[in-house]
Image (cartoon, helix red, strand yellow):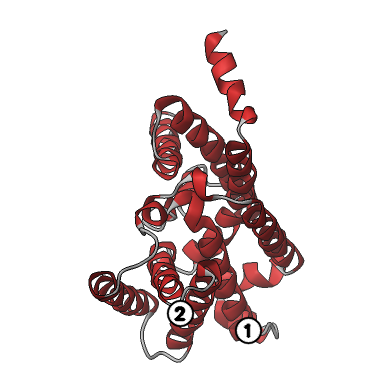
Amino acid sequence: MNLLSTILEIFDYQFMVYALIGGTLIAISAPIIGQFMISRRYANISDSLAHIALLGISLGLIVNQNTFVFGLITTIIAGIGIEYFRQHNILKGESALVLFTVTSLSSLAIIQQKIPLRRSLESILFGSVLNLEPSDIILTGILSIATILFVSINYKQLLNISINEDLAKVLGIPVKAYNYMLMTLAAIIISISLELIGGLLIGGIMIIPVLTARLYKLSFKKTIFMSVFFSVLAVWLGILSGWLLDLPSGAAIVMTSIIFFGISFATNILFKE
């Protein structure tokens, strides 16, 4: 009974309610994009764009402007740049990710040493439920719903592109435009996830639930639904365990995702025919 009372206390704190709402919105939209990213061999995109977003946030702190806007714009530009290099065969996907990641990290290191920032980046690196505001929830809701609607409306086209880009071009699908839009959505989701999950851990909510769902060898669409299920459950249990055990929310969410992966992997091995 005491445990139940402690759990219910979460809802007495506004910042925890914000975390649950914001986390659920992110948990629904992030793995949807993650499924398409993995299909295009871009599993590392979340880490790369998260580091780039941190650079944008640092620039926002320097000029004393909205850090989210700076992080979002920087991430979108980088995402489009990565896709441009891939589409024009300047660099292969993984090579472009390395180039942009190393550039952003080195720039970030120089900025942190030479220019004093008004805010520590530590909470952004690992995530904190304390940082979410009502405006963050509204913005997260709008962007998450927009992402879900875009994928729902354009699902067949995106699926064809994920399976075979050349065939999609033959079918008359504007492959380049869809790839740019998908990369932009990935940048948006990563940017709005930073405060809760953290820049170093964002892959735990965008990629790991998808990898877990893929162990069950379902159809593309069913894999998306199952990855969303694992993602939402990880967010709720992660925030709850973080609250009960006094753990960083981002790390607790990601560790929960990893536990789900481990359980699913073990189950897959034990019951494999």
Q: Residue at x 64, y 29 (%)?
A: 11
Instruction: Kindly identify the amino acid type of the residue bearing the numbered disc 2.
Output: Ala
Quarter of the figure with the N terminus: top right
- SS state under label 2: helix
Q: Is residue 136 above or below residue 54?
A: above
Where residue 222 sits: x, y (%)? 64, 48
The dot on residue 177 is 1
The dot on residue 76 is none
- SS state under label 1: helix
Quarter of the figure with the C terminus: top left
Q: Residue at x 45, y 79 (%)?
A: 78
Q: Quadrant of residue 35?
A: bottom right
Q: Residue at x 50, y 65 (%)?
A: 37
Disc 2 to disc 1, C-alpha distance:
16 Å
Residue found farthest to the top:
1
Q: Is residue 133 above or below residue 10?
A: below
Q: Residue at x 70, y 86 (%)?
A: 172
The residue lying toward the viewer, choosing from 273 and 176, is: 176
| Image position of 161 (left or right of 208) | right
The residue lying toward the viewer, choosing from 50 and 63, is: 63
Where residue 218 sits: x, y (%)? 58, 47
Neighbours of disc 1 within 10 Å: few (<14), some (14-19), many (20+)? few
Q: Quadrant of residue 252?
A: top left
The dot on residue 78 is 2
